[in-house]
Image (cartoon, rainbow, N blue to C red):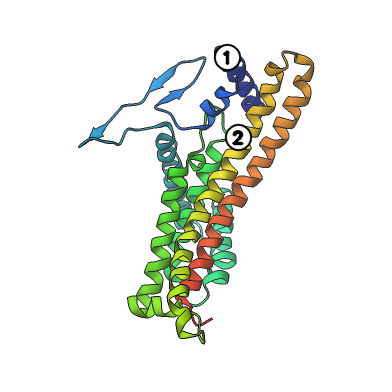
Amino acid sequence: MVLEIVQTATDSLKNASENGGGSGWIMHHVLDSRKLDFSPFGVIALPHIEVFGIDISITKHIVFMWFAVLILLAIFFYVAKEHKKSRIPSGLSNLMEILVVFVRDDIAKSTIGKGYERFLSYLLTIFFFILTCNLIGLIPYGSTPTSNIAVTATLATLSFLVIQGGGMIKYGVFGYFKGLMPHGIPIWLLPIMFVVEILGLFTKPFALAIRLFANMTAGHVVIFALIGLIFILKTYFVAPVSVAFALFIFLLEILVALIQAYIFTVLSGIFIGMAVHQEH
C-alpha cells in the first residue's frame, strides 16, 4: 500500500510538471489508453487494430481484464486441485469456499429463491470477475477495468439478457411481458403502464452500469487529487496530511471494491428473482 502511494506521488509530480500543474494528469491515470505506463521503467505501446473500419484495438483496460481472468483461472484451478486432494479446505481454498457459499446462500438463494441454481454460475462469475477487476486497480501500475463505462455497460447488458432470458424461459415471451403489467388497473391505463414497464426493464441495467462505474472512478480520482495537493500548493509541508488521507482512501477503496462487487451481484439477483417469480 505504501508503494502504491509513493508511486502515485512520483507519477503525480511528473505529470503535473508536464501539464503545467493542471489536473489533466488525474484523468490520464484513470481513463483508458493505448499504452501501459510503467514510468520510470518505460512505456509499452499497445497494438492498434481495425476490422472493416471498426476499431477493436487492445487497450489498457482490456489487458487488465485479461489479467483478471488469468488470475481467476489460476486460483480456481488451484482450488479444484486442492479439493481433490483433501475434502477439508485450508488457506486459499477455505477463503474461496467461504466466498462461494456466501454468494450461493446470501445472494442467489435469498434474492432469487426457488430455482436459484440455474443462475448461480452467472452470479458467481460476475461477483469474482468484478471483485478481481476492482482490486487490480489498487496494485502499483495497475488499472481498474470497472472504472470504464464500456466495461460496466457490457456487464450490465449481460445481466439484462440473463434477467429477460430467465423470465421468458419460465413464462414464454408473451406470458413474461403480460406478467409485467400490474393486476387490476383500468384498461385505459394499460398502454401507459406498458411503456413505463418497458422503460423500467432498461433503467435497471443502466443503474447497474452507472453505479459501478461512478464508484470505482470516484475513489481513484480522490486519491490522485489528494496527492496532487502537494504539487498544486507547491509545498511539501502538506505531504504528510495528503499522504495520510490518500492512504485512508486507499484502504477504504479495498472495502469499496468488495461492496461494489456485492451490490452489482445482489441487484442482478434481485432483478432475476423479479423476472422469474412475477407472481410474488
Residues 183 and 8: in front is 183
Residue hosting label 1: 14
| Label located before the other in sequence (2 or 1) | 1
Whether residue 90 is visible, yes or no, is no
Q: Secondary structure at mark 1?
A: helix
Residue sitting at x 58%, y 71%: 110
Label 2 neighbour load within 10 Å: few <14, some 14-19, many 20+: many
Residue sitting at x 53%, y 32%: 30
Name the quarter where the N terminus is drawn: top right
Where is residue 217? Give x, y as percent.
57, 39
Residues 72 and 93: in front is 72
Which amino acid type corresponds to the residue marked 2 in the rendered image?
Answer: His
Residue sitting at x 58%, y 35%: 138
Which amino acid type corresponds to the residue marked 1 in the rendered image?
Answer: Lys
CA gap between label 2 and label 1 equals 18 Å
Where is residue 181? Give x, y as percent.
46, 78
Above or below 249: residue 275: below
Whether residue 111 is visible, yes or no, is yes
Residue hosting label 2: 220
Residues 216 and 64: in front is 216
Q: Residue furthest bottom?
A: 184
